[in-house]
Amino acid sequence: MVSKLRQDIAAKSESDGGTLGGLRMTKQRKLVYDVLMDERDHPTATEVYIRSKQRMSSISLATVYNCLETLSAAGLVKQVNVGRDASRYCPNLAEHAHFICAKCEQVFDIGLKSDKKVESVWALPIGARIDHLEVAMKGVCANCNGAGEELGGKG
Ligand SMILES: [Zn+2]
Ligand SMILES: [Zn+2]
């Protein structure tokens, strides 16, 4: 099922009710979701696994992948693809794009300016409707731009 841009889901986080956005939350799904919500730094699946394992030592990487897949399919988290790197995961359901720093590889959430709509920024095909927004930009963040220090050892 294609998820529409549903900002409203973020508002009703009835996490202890056992379901979230219509999805039944198993212990593992809840844990993976909590990990994403706690530190919104767009971790990779491996990073989510490491953090999850600190809270539930029995969880496996396969389970984490599974949970991420399910949460993405349910529209509760966004999968962010950054070039050839591993996918990152984002629990921010508000309409936003991503800015990726090529130096420190931080991923920033960026929103449209308050008076803009996606339709007014991009020249969409006539009559087209957006159901899913996935925009990523690469550059250098302010921190890296100003610091001017080299990050060696990049393969
Ligand atoms: Zn940076
Ligand atoms: Zn994001």
Image (cartoon, rainbow, N blue to C red):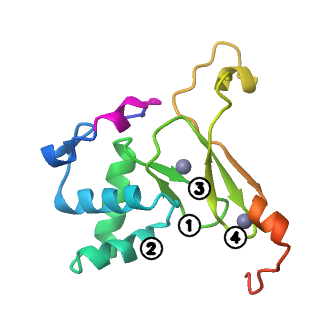
Which dot marks residue 86? 1
Whichever of callouts 1 and 4 sits on the residue coming sooner in the sequence is: 1
Q: Please state the extent of the stretch shown in magenta in the rendering.
A: 4-12
Instruction: Give the label, 3 or 4, closer to the camera.
Output: 4
Pointer 3 or 2: first along the chain: 2
The three-letter code of the residue at mark 2 reads: Thr
Of the numbered discs 3 and 4, the one sitting upstream in the chain is: 3
Which disc, if any, is residue 81? 3
Does the numbered disc 1 mark a residue whose Cβ is under 8 Å from ligand 2?
no
| Amino acid residing under circle 4 | Cys
Q: Residue at x 21, y 41 (%)?
A: 14
Foreground mark, 1 or 4, reads 4
- Mark 1: amino acid: Ala
User: Which residue in the structure is indicated by mark 4?
Assistant: 104
In the picture, residue 83 is in which quadrant?
Answer: bottom right
Q: Is 102 situated left or right of 22 in this image?
A: right
